Image (cartoon, coloured by chain):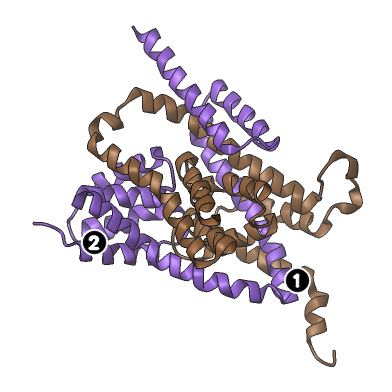
Chain colours: A brown, B purple
Amino acid sequence: MIFLFLCFEFAKIGLFSFGGGYATLPFLYHMSEVHGWFSLNELSQMLAISSITPGPVGLNVATFAGFKTAGILGSICATMSIMLPSFVFVVIVSKMLKKFKDSPTLFSLMYVLRPVAAALLAAVSFRLFFDSIIKFDTFSNFALKNIDTKAFLLFIVLLIVSLKVKKDPLIYLALGAIAGLLLHFNHIIKLIPFA
Amino acid sequence: MKIRLSELFLVCVRIGALLLGGGYVIVPLLVSEFSEKRNWLTREEIIDFYAMGQCIPGIIAPNTIMLAGYKLRGKTGAFCALLGLTLAPFVAILALASFVSILLKSVIMNDIFWGVNVAIIILIILTVKEVWGVSVVDRLTFLFFIIAFLMCVFGISPAIIIVLAIICGLLRSKIVKGESK
């Protein structure tokens, strides 16, 4: 039963996501909230690992999320279903290539879909920021002491770096990993015997 | 000359294994493997497929390679190309996925992922910035952006938002057609 449900949910992502690999994120985010198949934190981890693995990030995240939810069979279901709508569209579009390319309707559709897809992604970053750095769920429990100060500082530093230099996404993941180790230096010290 | 499916599949496996970074990397890889090395397609055709891959729902890189596969060998070609592209990343993710849960039991790995999670937010913001440049081009698109952003923040399903956007796009094309008459 979980497999049918998984197929349905991932086919929905394949049908409704437009734009780069990250376009699948708003849907996965929504999925974690509604179905609870994986936590938000796990989603970030999956995304990080998918970015350093070869292959399209969107596809990798789907494989990973499917695996997390229902094992190997789950990952097969997720990967196949996320691509199924695209496959159907490829077949249809290839048959009427010329008409499709210069269609004014398509132009109008993309004119609206592009900013909307960007907005969905912006909303994901906005909510990740508030969930994992500010730790702010509802207005009732807002407290300054909940803010993860170290994470907030790291965020600002990385943001400044991103404004100054435009480099490979891997750089940011590496910087994040290094900062994670350095800012929790006391954990490493504990590992060293007799220290 | 008919291109052999097994060869198409193997070339796509290679592309899947080499595809690192953003989805646009598919273009230079396809140009090198499909055009320069094998003369299956022209460079222009590949760039066209990439542009169309962005207008088809789903993930761009697989869309592009499926369009190329379809051109070469029809439906079977598209399916072969997709299967090839997926193979290497699929195996890599499965191998890592079973590994990660063990790794995450260690405090050090948790520290690393704490930092990586912050970096992920930056990566998403950078993607938004990049897409913003080509998508928010006037007041109307800015309005669409704000409305969709608020709807998503308040927990409305992204699928519903996209369907509404498609309806808006169709309405707009009707209006534009009406005006030009």
Q: Position of residue B12 (x, y in %)?
A: 31, 62
Residue that badge 1 annotates:
A182
Residue B132 seen in render? no
Q: Residue at x 46, y 57 (%)?
A: A77
Residue that badge 2 annotates:
B8
Q: Position of residue A78 (x, y in %)?
A: 48, 56
Query: Residue farthest to the left?
Result: B1
Q: Is residue A163 left or right of residue A141?
A: left
- Residue A158 image-quadrant placement: bottom right
Q: Nearer the viewer, mark 2 or mark 1?
A: 2
Query: Residue farthest to the front?
Result: A1
Q: Position of residue B103 (x, y in %)?
A: 65, 76
- Output the chain of dot 2: B
Q: Position of residue B115 (x, y in %)?
A: 70, 63
Q: Amino acid at mark 2?
A: Leu
Q: Residue at x 65, y 50 (%)?
A: A35
Q: Nearer the viewer, residue B74 or A22?
A: B74
Residue A150 seen in render? yes
SS under mark 2: helix
Q: Residue at x 29, y 28 (%)?
A: A102
